[in-house]
Image (cartoon, rainbow, N blue to C red):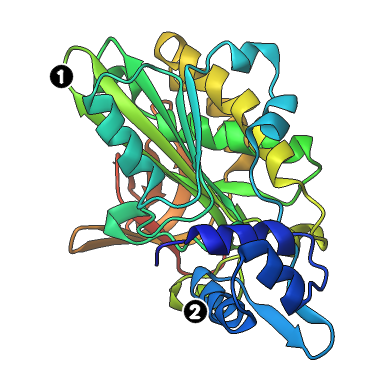
Amino acid sequence: MVISDKQKKILALLADGEFHSGTELSDALGESRSAVWKQMNGLAELGLQHSAVSGRGYRLDKPLELLAQLEIYEAVNDQARALISSFEIHDQIDSTNNYLVERSHNNAPSGSICFSEYQTAGKGRRGRQWVSPYGSNIYLSILWHFQQGPAAISGLSLAIGVAVIRALKQHHVNDIGLKWPNDIYSQGKKLGGILVEVSGETDGPCSAIIGLGLNLYLPETEAETITQAWTDLSKITGENKLSRNKLAGTLLNHLLPVIAEYEGVGIKAYLDEWRDYDCLKGEAATLFIAQQQFEGIVQGIDDNGMLLIKRVDGNVQTFASGEVSFSGSAR
């Protein structure tokens, strides 16, 4: 669905979560009250539920904190700000990763940042769609160019996971961990995901688009298509007071330095911390690679960031890629 300018005006008024009369909205839009009613009905398609009460008007079921560059920048420190070359916030986009892939083809520089309020085709792993309701979560992508080829940035998604955990802990979000290779988890449920897309020469310069989707508040109606256990920060913290703009700034503070230094330090600089947050180790799990399945007990990761699984026969196998699902309790 395309967000109209009229709907954006309505959302700016309704973002406070208070009632606004049909007359007030009608005057703001320069439209009839029946036209306002039609625009309000369209908001549900964006994942924005609202109430309409006779004599009081319209109110969103949950207040919105829309992304604002100035407010995000207030939370960005000097080190991170120096690494930003361009900064964009979109009302809607097919995918923040797709957008920066296109920009990278047009020689966009390292440090290009893209946020969006809404994604029509958000990208998860293995071609899945990332559920992306309007104004509720973090949809962020960062473009960075590396000189030594893809092999030099192997394990980058694990380091990004560490950076995300650091940012969340700064906001006093606890009981969170990392699920190999690129998921943020809490109490066995997915909180966020990382998608790193690399293109370029095998042994020469390459570009990476680092995408992050993080659930702050995910309406149940929007989550109906999600096939795995999920959670959001409002459930973890028990409140809805975590500022999207402040969190967005904190994420940039942690993500950008990790990305900028990664080619020089590699995964080894983050191994110990990643292992501290590993929520798979000791768990019975199944690893899926194409049509194959490998069952066993996860033994953690090796010094190259690869997954270790102890099979039924007692042998420990190493895996560089795949998708892991919990399949039982730890043994």
Residue positioned most to the bottom: 54
> Tag 2's secondary structure?
helix
Q: Quadrant of residue 272?
A: top right
Q: Is residue 301 left or right of residue 323?
A: right
- Residue 26: where, in percent of width, then height? 67, 72
- For the N terminus, which image quadrant? bottom left
Inspect the image, locate mark 1, and give the three-letter code of the amino acid beneath it: Glu
Placement of 32 over or under 188, stated as above or below:
below
Counting residues from the start of the chain, the first of labels 2 and 1 encountered is 1
Q: Which residue is mark 1?
A: 201
Write the residue at 47% across / 61% down: 4
- Residue 207: where, in percent of width, then height? 29, 23
Q: Which residue is mark 2?
A: 224
Q: Is residue 227 left or right of residue 12?
A: left
Q: Residues within 10 Å of mark 2 (few under 14, many from 20)?
A: few
> Tag 1's secondary structure?
loop
Write the residue at 68% across / 12% down: 78
- For the C terminus, which image quadrant? bottom right
Q: Which dot marks residue 32?
A: none
- Asked whether the viewer can see residue 56, the reply is yes
- For the residue pair 44 and 131, the one nearer the viewer reads as 44
- Residue 14: where, in percent of width, then height? 72, 64
Q: Are marks 2 and 1 in contact (CB under 8 Å)?
A: no
Q: Quadrant of residue 21?
A: bottom right
